Image: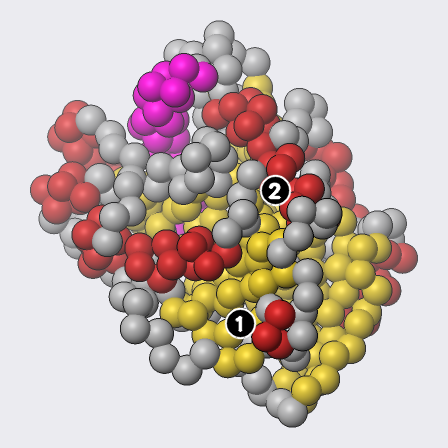
Amino acid sequence: MATTAPLPVETPTAADFLPLRGTDHVEFYVGNARQAAYFYRAAFGMSLVAYAGPETGRRDRASYVLQQGKVRFVLTTPLRSDSPIADHIARHGDGVKTIALWVDDARAAWQETTRRGATSVIEPTETTDDHGTAVISAIAAYGDTLHAFVDRGNYTGAFLPGYRAVKDDIVARPVGLLHIDHCVGNVGWNAMNQWVKFYEDIMGFGLYQHFDDNDISTEYSALMSKVMANGNGYVKFPINEPAEGKRKSQIEEYLDFYGGPGVQHIALATNNILETVARMQQQGVEFLTVPHSYYTELQGRVGKIDEPVDELERLGILVDRDDEGYMLQIFTRPVEDRPTLFYEIIQRKGSRSFGKGNFKALFEAIEREQASRGNL
């Protein structure tokens, strides 16, 4: 049964050894960043705001920085085959390499986490251009995923030193995305508690919510999930691991096709999910669907809501309620050819939960997709 720990409360910086201001950006390694950037601009409505590549002095890669609200994606592609980036793509396909966290002091963040046992990947590195100075460091997380710490307090440029600003984007068609609500990682069998301990001991996170296979299961498959959150609650990392079931779960499918642990989905917040999802559908984003019966039972389960049920059904949006309010959510189909990365669009109207009441409908929808791929 799900359990909910006391919600994190903001703590003074002196008491929080890793104070986080939020998610700075998410970097993806992709086979063709120019084309991937076009997809996110045209479909998700993100704007191209900065670029780095051979024209800016980077000889081994090209990176496109996309932004909408506080959501910032960096799409990076290798320019040569003998590259660690190319090796990452060959192993995993297109996917998330780095979840970068916004901090006031990237040196202190690196020192505190490595002192507690984190594996250093990038020692604190200072870069400077005409717009100021930024400091970045990074540590290893699950699989080949990294957590970077970005200190941009003395930097005023479009992104970071080494990138040139892009002023106008004639492709972007914004859909109302505000910020990253949470990033979900999939880990292997019996590995979740190892990574819960990592976030507790090394990054100072606490257990926010816990769901077991009684909460997240269908006739065929199951998984377990623990949600970790930092002290002020700005950053939340749910961690999923497979659980025993009659057939292959979505987590097992992910691990098989991604080639190990990694980021499964990114939840993007909006304050008008009806408008956001309608625009995204018009712009070609495909979402999972649930049967009509879900909506005939909806108001009896969640009570009075502001949104018309027929409009929620037309768009395929799910609703769940907790003691603090309700939330609306919907999930895309995988955005890569491998059945790995997908997105959640979420609107919170008081609720700080993760949609426990929708788990069965959602996972049955995912299983229908798995079955169509021959992977259930």
Of 263 and 216, the residue lying toward us: 263
Q: Measured along the vertical axis of the image, is residue 203 above or below residue 291? A: below
Farthest right residue in view? 115
Is residue 152 highlighted in magenta?
A: no
Kindly indicate the quadrant of the structure image that contains residue 22.
bottom right
Label 2: few (<14), some (14–19) or many (≥20) C-alpha neighbours in 10 Å: many
Q: Position of residue 368 (x, y in %)?
A: 33, 21
* Residue 365 on the magenta span: yes
Rendered residue at 80%/55% (across/down): 121
Dominant secondary structure of the residues highlighted in magenta in the image: helix
Question: As rendered, which of 330 and 121 lies closer to the eye?
Answer: 121
The residue under the point 54% across, 47% down is 31
Quarter of the figure that contains the C terminus:
top left
The span shown in magenta is 351-375
Residue under the image location 66 percent in, 27 percent down: 188
The disc label shown at residue 51, or none = 1
* Front one among 344 and 48: 48
| Placement of 368 over or under 186, stated as above or below | above
Residue 55 visible in the picture: yes
In the image: residue 213, left or right of residue 102: left
Q: 54 left or right of 39?
A: right
Can see residue 183?
A: no
How far apart are the two marked residues, 2 and 1, measured between alpha carbons?
20 Å
Q: Which mark is residue 89?
A: 2
Q: Is residue 205 left or right of residue 21?
A: right
Q: Residue at x 57, y 84 (%)?
A: 157
Q: Position of residue 241 (x, y in %)?
A: 60, 28
Q: Which comes sooner in the sequence, label 2 or label 1?
A: 1
The secondary element bearing badge 2 is classed as helix
Label 1: element kind = strand
